[in-house]
Amino acid sequence: MNEINVRRLEDLPVEILFEIFKYLKPEELYSSMAHLNIRMNMILKKQPNLKISIYCLKPALSFFDSFTSLTIRFDNRNKLHLYQFQYLNLINLRSLNIDIVYYQWWTVVSEDELNTFITPDRCPLLKYLRLSGCTTKLTEFIFTGAFPYLKKCIIKNCQEFFSTSSTTSTKFLRYLHMHSKNESDFHRMLSMCPKLQHLHFHSDKLPSTQIQNIHYPLLKCLSLRRLKNFLFHNGEFDIFLSYFPNLINFNLTVDHSRNHDEIIDFAQVADCLHRRIPRLKKLKLNIYLCRTYPYQLFVDQFPLIAQMHELFRSINKCDSLIYIRSFDFNPLYMDYWHYIRPASEPKS
């Protein structure tokens, strides 16, 4: 076996240096190894998986130009602006997270700054994108496939969804998490993401159920939060579930309507789940009861409700909130408000 005769760290083979670099932060690499010699500079710049998190401006940023992951955080403690990072070379970037700790994100980062910083030309290899706010221009880039490798996208606050007659769609997007003030965005997004498998959609209203003869067979995981004035028995819930025949994971958080005298019939809810999404394996229901109900109406019926569907395994009531779970519960913490169906009991 050949031995490596090396007296200086910077003379080690590239493969060994890359292994050492894994244990050091980018700023540590820069302060200890940058500018030692031309060879070391070239090696540092060509690291395949360099990840950088920015909470303040650092000299190292202007040195590295091959990082694959970048996080920029804006909060009330720093005085950063996105234009200060415009010089960065993002050509090899795979993951980008711009975290703005303000509800009104546009007061910190302007639309022009965001549109200029994130473009297909600057980030051609982007696979993961997480934004606290998103402009209309950026949504157009995302949903028309301008980022050809984008697979996962999280958008906390979205402006008005872009309007276009383009039939172009994104072929690679598999996971989408989006907050929208317009429930009509739901079907538009799905129509432009034919390969989508996981969708987390936050809106005030249930997406339209007026669309007929449409299905999203590839969608496996759906999470809806937090729908207001929701009704289970006016027909819309049943129609909506029919759009997703192959759903495996369903997460629903709703405010039950306070303007209607509907009382939830869990037998009908279970029937809808059985008929419309028979492949369901994981269920999470959070129901906020916005009106006052007799105490016995739900709590005393927990054992009966738990028999209505095989995924109604855990039922818990906390103040005005009812939780129904098929997973993620601990029998050691059971109390009178929390019922867990014994494993030996038969299910419907």
Image: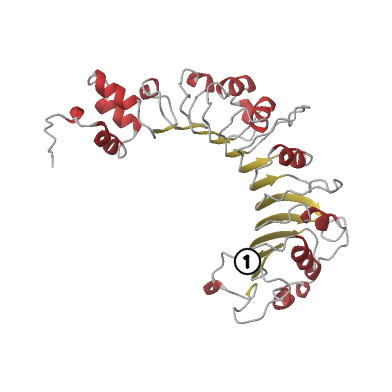
Q: Residue at x 77, y 28 (%)?
A: 163
Q: According to the image, label 1 marks what residue?
A: 326
Q: Is residue 337 left or right of residue 56?
A: right
Q: Amino acid at mark 1?
A: Ser
Q: Residue 101 appears at what percent x and percent y?
A: 56, 35
Could you say which quadrant of the image residue 26 lies in?
Answer: top left
Q: Nearer the viewer, residue 102 or 340?
A: 340
Q: Nearer the viewer, residue 43 or 237?
A: 43
Quadrant holding the C terminus: bottom right
Could you say which quadrant of the image residue 165 lies in?
Answer: top right
Question: In this picture, is 50 found above or below 176?
Answer: above
Q: Nearer the viewer, residue 114 or 318?
A: 114
Could you say which quadrant of the image residue 303 lies in?
Answer: bottom right
Q: Residue 148 appears at what percent x and percent y?
A: 58, 31
Q: In the displayed image of the protein, which residue is found farthest to the front?
A: 1
Looking at the image, can residue 231 be seen? no
Q: Nearer the viewer, residue 136 or 151?
A: 151
Quadrant holding the N terminus: top left
